[in-house]
Amino acid sequence: MGDASPQVAPASSGRVIFLGPPGAGKGTQAARLAAHMGVPKISTGDMLREAIARGTPLGLQAAPLMEKGGLVPDELLIGIIQERLREDDCARGYILDGFPRTLKQAEGFESMAGGDRTAELLVFSVEVPRPELLRRLSGRRWCPRCQATYHVETNPPKREGLCDRDGMRLIQREDDKETAVARRLAEYDERTAPLIDHYCRRARFHRVDGHRPVDAVFDELKGLLEAAR
Ligand code: AP5
């Protein structure tokens, strides 16, 4: 066989970052793509909400910031990601949903993941018009046990108000209420949007139109993933 093609996906297509404003559909698409690729989806928002539910020191520090729609300090996030990426299931790749979110986090991530490998990263920026983001966030409902996400109009659970997976009562995230949403969008514009330019110049970067049905967005992502292999 000599130098035949590798049997596993090369690292270049195994590490994916989702960028995009709150409500763009990052979590929805990251979960589907992770299942498709057989790699873990690492969502810093989910990790923080779990820490809050368990009342850990990280959760106690993050809760008041998240409720108001602010960002949690960079050092904390860089630390939890560094620890998570050391786990065995990340060896063949991973999908990052919600991290990095500031230039400082991007630099922290790149130094822990090998700065010279940034060009191999696949970065998707999911773009959705603002009125649609507001519609999605105000209608989102969430399962506090398994973190499944629904929407009252476009993706309702089978039984009203109850999670399809575990029957838990669905709730509205505290930070999906109006004032917190305004702050989250402002944080995105000011601190996360500059990452578009950052990765545009350093990684395999793609803008993806997220204002389409979930399946259409997913089909495009799969195509881009294939093209990167
Ligand atoms: P996080 O949980 O990451 O929230 P976010 O980035 O604001 O993103 P969302 O979860 O709101 O939206 P999404 O893009 O994942 O959309 P989703 O797929 O759910 O972070 C929360 C907070 O944690 C932050 O504000 C911050 O405080 C803290 N934090 C997290 N990471 C941090 C970091 N790195 N640094 C500092 N602080 C951090 O979809 C939204 C809705 O739309 C759903 O109802 C869904 O069903 C629906 N939907 C999805 N796709 C479609 C579609 N194509 N068509 C119609 N509806 C759709």
Image (spheres, helix red, strand yellow):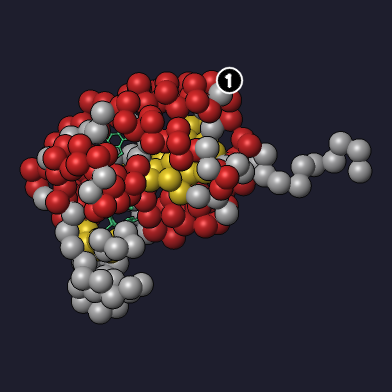
Viewer-nearest residue: 222 or 142: 142
Residue placed furthest toward the left: 179
Percent position of residue 160, x then y: 21, 76
Q: Position of residue 202 (x, y in %)?
A: 50, 22
Q: As displayed, is residue 110 above or below residue 227?
A: above
Provide residue 133's location: percent of width, then percent of height: 23, 48
Residue 48 visible in rendering = yes
Q: Amino acid at mark 1?
A: Asp
Left or right, 52 with reference to 16: left
Where is 48 relative to 36, above or below? above
- Single out the residue that lies furthest toward the bottom: 159
Residue 3, position as x, y percentages in the image: 86, 36
Judged from the image, the secondary structure of the residue bearing numbered disc 1 is helix
Can residue 124 be seen by looking at this rendering? no
Question: In which quadrant is the N terminus drawn?
Answer: top right
In the image, 172: left or right of 101?
Answer: left
Q: Quadrant of residue 66?
A: top left
Residue at horizontal 34%, vertical 33%? Answer: 77
Residue, disc 1:
116
Q: Which quadrant of the structure image shows residue 63?
A: top left
Viewport quadrant of the C terminus: top right
Picture residue at 25% right of the left edge, 71% below the top: 168
**Mark 1 surroundings: few (<14), some (14-19) or many (≥20) residues within 10 A:** few
Instruction: Tell me if residue 109 comes above or below residue 13 in the rendering.
Output: above
Q: Residue at x 42, y 21 (%)?
A: 107
Drawn side of residue 86 relative to residue 99, left or right: right
Comparing 185 with 168, the one in front is 168
Query: Which of the pair 56/86 is nearer the observer?
Result: 56
Q: Quadrant of residue 76?
A: top left
